[in-house]
Amino acid sequence: MTETAPIRIFNQMKKTLLDAAFPPGCASCAEPIDIPGTLCANCWQDLTYITPPFCEACGYPFEYAEPGVILCGVCVKRAPSFTRARAVLKYDDASRDMILGYKHSDQTDRAPAFASWMLRAGRELVEECDIICPVPLHRRRLVARRFNQSALLALEIGRLAKRAVCPDMLLRIKPTRSQGGLSARARFRNVKGVFKANPLRLSQIEDQRILLIDDVYTTGATLEACSDCLLRTGAADVDVLTFSRVVRGSDLSI
Ligand SMILES: [Zn+2]
Ligand SMILES: [Zn+2]
């Protein structure tokens, strides 16, 4: 049955009124909740927060603390180019929809809530940095998606913590195929030579302690490529703060 114009208009009005009566709900399942930007009790308890003990360098969570162990096996073999990486949540079934919804479905109203959680998880990193820089999107992807999800998080964190943010410190000079489904080694190859320091922003990079922001830490390949680029350009130090983190052995399909 086709909708007549008056019914269509009525349905649209009903939706608008309902949206006004029930402000955006749980950041994961959209159930109505009391405090905007938070989660309902059900979703809250399903999430896995990344808390100490974890690897000092990449933030990989350890199941238990072992005296004298501060680095994970991967970082012992080869230290990442950034100094510290921290994340709020484990990327898993419970957090995936919330993150993909934010990234691909225009749920940008989640950015302030995500940023406040990131600020809590990475307070030390935020306080110690001079300037915040998001992982950039390639121009073509930015046009398709209309916003850079990492830049929105960076701007919100900067606003909350009163820190400078430079959204175009790094440029993505080559489009890359999506990292989804690629092995760790292929991900590192895929981002080689992809980033370039913005020549107009050199004074904000040289001798500065920079905090890189992204939504998900997967293998660290993208973040390492960005960090390499900043350090080669003269940054004093680079830390990384992400909303979620894939814990090796769990699903990488993002
Ligand atoms: Zn929920
Ligand atoms: Zn590590």
Image (tube, rainbow, N blue to C red):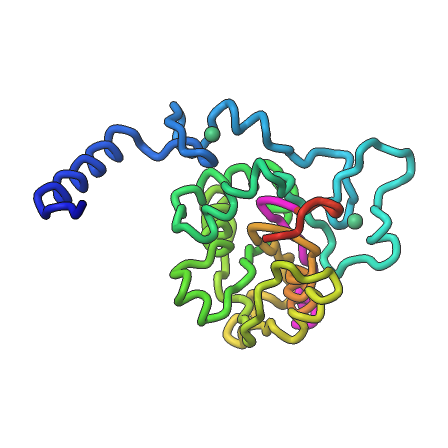
Q: Percent x, y for residue 229?
A: 66, 70
Q: Residue at x 67, y 62 (%)?
A: 182
**Which residue is situated farthest in the front direction here?**
1
Q: Pick whichever, 149 or 208, lies toward us.
A: 149
Q: Pick whichever, 82 or 93, lies toward us.
A: 93
Q: Main secondary structure of the magenta part?
A: strand
Q: Percent x, y for residue 43?
A: 52, 29
103 over 197 or under it: above or below: above
Within the magenta stretch, is there residue 179?
A: no
22 over 191 or under it: above or below: above
Q: How many marks?
A: 0
Q: Residue at x 21, y 38 (%)?
A: 16
Q: Is residue 23 visible?
A: yes
Q: Is residue 236 visible?
A: no
8 over 14 or under it: above or below: below
For the N terminus, give its image quadrant.
top left
Q: Is residue 159 left or right of residue 194?
A: left
Q: Residue at x 57, y 36 (%)?
A: 94
Q: Residue at x 54, y 37 (%)?
A: 117
**Which residue is situated farthest in the right direction here?**
68
Q: Pick whichever, 19 or 82, lies toward us.
A: 19
Q: Percent x, y for residue 246?
A: 67, 47
24 over 212 or under it: above or below: above
**Segment tinted magenta in the rendering:** 231-245
Please identify the quarter of the rendering in which residue 27 is found.
top left
Within the magenta stretch, is there residue 242?
A: yes
Q: Percent x, y for residue 25?
A: 38, 32
